[in-house]
Amino acid sequence: MLTAAEKGQISEKAPAVPDYSKYQRSYHIPFGNSKPVDFENLKSMSVRASLNGGPPMRFQIDTGSTGVIAGASDVPNIDPNAPAGSITYSSSGVELLGVWTPVTITFPDSKDEHGNVATAVVPVLAVSERKVHPGAVNSGSFTPSKNPKIYMFGIGSGRGKEPHQEKNPWVNLKEMQAGTMRRGYTITREGITLGLTAKTVGEGYLYEKLNEHTGQVEGAAAKQGGVRDWESSRGWAVVGGVKCETSGMLLDTGLTNMMLQAPTPASKGDVADGTEVTVHLLSGRLFYSFKVGDTANPVAPRKVSWVVRTTGPLINTGLRALALYDYLYDADGGYFGLRPVLKRQ
């Protein structure tokens, strides 16, 4: 059984709670993993999607980036006038270059209450080259390549210098564009729900109201394609008894390791095995603990590394925090939610 600390402790600060009672429409999508997702030993999560009517492909679900990324050879009917673009992953130093081409994305395994299939039209980065910039925590796992095979499904918020939620298919379904579905999604043991309703969300979530992510855009709410973007929720970590600075907290389904903002120039490399780490989420309303290197603890990441960021403090927990929580993102209201989940027998 998980200990109380592993289940995640709850403090008693008053929550902010969104109201989904007037919304009725949603889609359910099962995970696309070839085997059932093992939440006691999380390594990745995937979803199946079709691009421009092509064959369904399995993409890694990535809450740590925004934008669907695929090798150019896997994207049918690339717009010949599509603008050049790129995306760089800070955890790996990988830079992917290609063009942002408009794509109709269909989720063949999805269904709503009427048996319809979910569809979104968004820009997709059709990749023709991969570069690798040294010095990142995971850069040693990749090599430069022409025409690489890439299958990343970036559905995160608050990523990058500019808000670009128009590239996030999970908040741009055709019903969301029409205003008949609440923009947002959940990731639970049962799979993925696109569109937030009182019935599909259910009870038990703890919420944090997020600050809007406007990046370098000045003035009122920064919207791209009619969708607001939101900063990460807030929290902190205590490492070996020393509290790190309160910062953005990213539960990144694209990583199995954890990255911490270095508190001093002397904080370098990986945190030593056996070090006690406590992670405080939702501005302190939830927390969980582990010892670095404890492979028997499902929330312990593959490794914990100190990193230096240039855009402000941020703690990346990796995906193994989801051994304890269901995950909710509300793009219309600007809420992030976590629901503690007891260990399944």
Image (cartoon, rainbow, N blue to C red):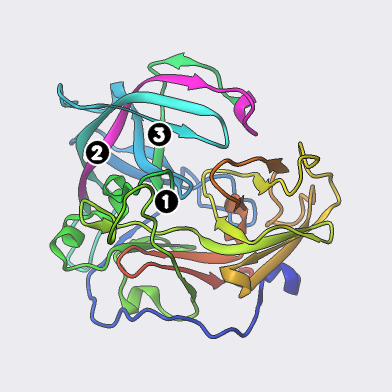
* Spot occupied by residue 158 in the image (x, y as percentages of width and height): 42, 52
* Spot occupied by residue 324 in the image (x, y as percentages of width and height): 61, 65
Numbered circle sitting on residue 123: 2
The verdict on residue 19 being magenta is no
Q: Amino acid at mark 2?
A: Pro
Q: Residues within 10 Å of mark 1 (few under 14, many from 20)?
A: many
Residue 303 in view in this figure:
no
On the rendered image, what quadrant is the C terminus found in? Answer: bottom right
Q: Which residue is mark 1?
A: 156
Q: Amino acid at mark 3?
A: Tyr
Label 3 element class = strand
Region of the chain picked out in magenta, as a range: 120-140
Residue 276 in view in this figure:
yes
| Position of 127 relative to 286 (above/below) | above
Q: Which residue is mark 3?
A: 151
Label 1 element class = loop
Left or right relative to 278: residue 60: left
The verdict on residue 139 being magenta is yes
